[in-house]
Amino acid sequence: MSTKRFFLFGIFVWCFTNNTVFAQSSYQLGALPTFNANYTLKNDWSVNGRLESRLLFQTGRSDGFINRDFNYQLTDFALLGAKKVGLKSRVAGGFLVRVEGNEIIFRLIQQYILVRKMSGIRFAHRIMTDQTFSKSEKPDFRLRYRLSTEFALNGESVDPGEFYIKVNNEYLNSVQDLTYDLEIRLVPLLGYSLNNRYKIEAGLDYRVNSFIRGNARHTYWMNFNFFIEI
């Protein structure tokens, strides 16, 4: 399946899940402020640190129930080390620590990234596995695939002082306590390159899961990303 067809398939699945299961669904509205720091090392190694918080503004159900109480949900800190294994690919591994209430959740992460450029559009394929462990729940094992497309609004590449568009489409397969679930994410973002070291992005992070069991949960996050190259 070509990259274009795969992306169109993701749009189709997103529309299908929204229209066929919304009668038995719930939703969440919130914000995801994220800070990313990248540091380049010798011999094609790099390190990425990410700090992300999850703020919930509103929840509701399709039966009309609405709760507008503000809720700070959690904070994630992730640290990944990566190494180039080809001209346009790299492997990475690391961990994530989640602080959620009084609980500490730990996640191991492994991923492979392949980047391609065609006609001024940057395509990044990411295959990722992770394993999440906590005291309150059974271990959660996930296999994820994400396609990212990025293109400049002016010219063939993103230069300092210019805007760009990025769209992420991701599929998360999860197995927890012998129960399978699929989550689909669609994240359109508007980015701006301040200079060679700083970038900012803002957009919508839409997620839908649990629709396989007929009780879909739709989540809409306002996504704010800040990137720095150290």
Image (cartoon, rainbow, N blue to C red):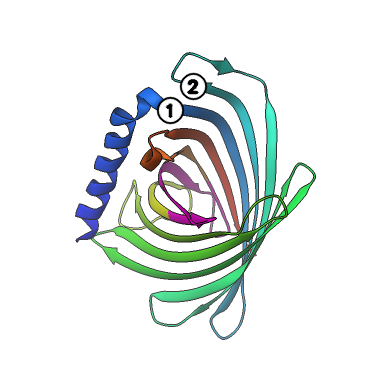
Query: Whole-percent x and y of residue 132?
Result: 61, 59
Q: Quadrant of the C terminus?
A: bottom right
Between 44 and 13, which is closer to the camera in this rendering?
A: 13
* Residue drawn at x 42%, y 56% as measured from the top left: 173
Q: What stretch is highlighted in magenta?
A: 173-200
Residue 150 falls left or right of residue 207: left
CB atoms of marks 2 and 1 within 8 Å: yes
Query: Is 181 inside the magenta-drawn segment?
Result: yes
Q: Which residue lies furthest to the front in this view?
A: 178
Question: Which amino acid type is shown beneath numbered disc 2?
Answer: Arg
Between 193 and 39, which is closer to the camera in this rendering?
A: 39
Q: Residues within 10 Å of mark 2 (few under 14, many from 20)?
A: some
Q: Residue furthest top?
A: 64
Q: Which quarter of the figure has residue 118?
A: bottom left
Query: Whole-percent x and y of residue 96?
Result: 65, 60
Residue 55 falls left or right of residue 195: right
Q: What residue sits right under mark 1 in the picture? A: 25
Q: What residue sits right under mark 2 in the picture? A: 61
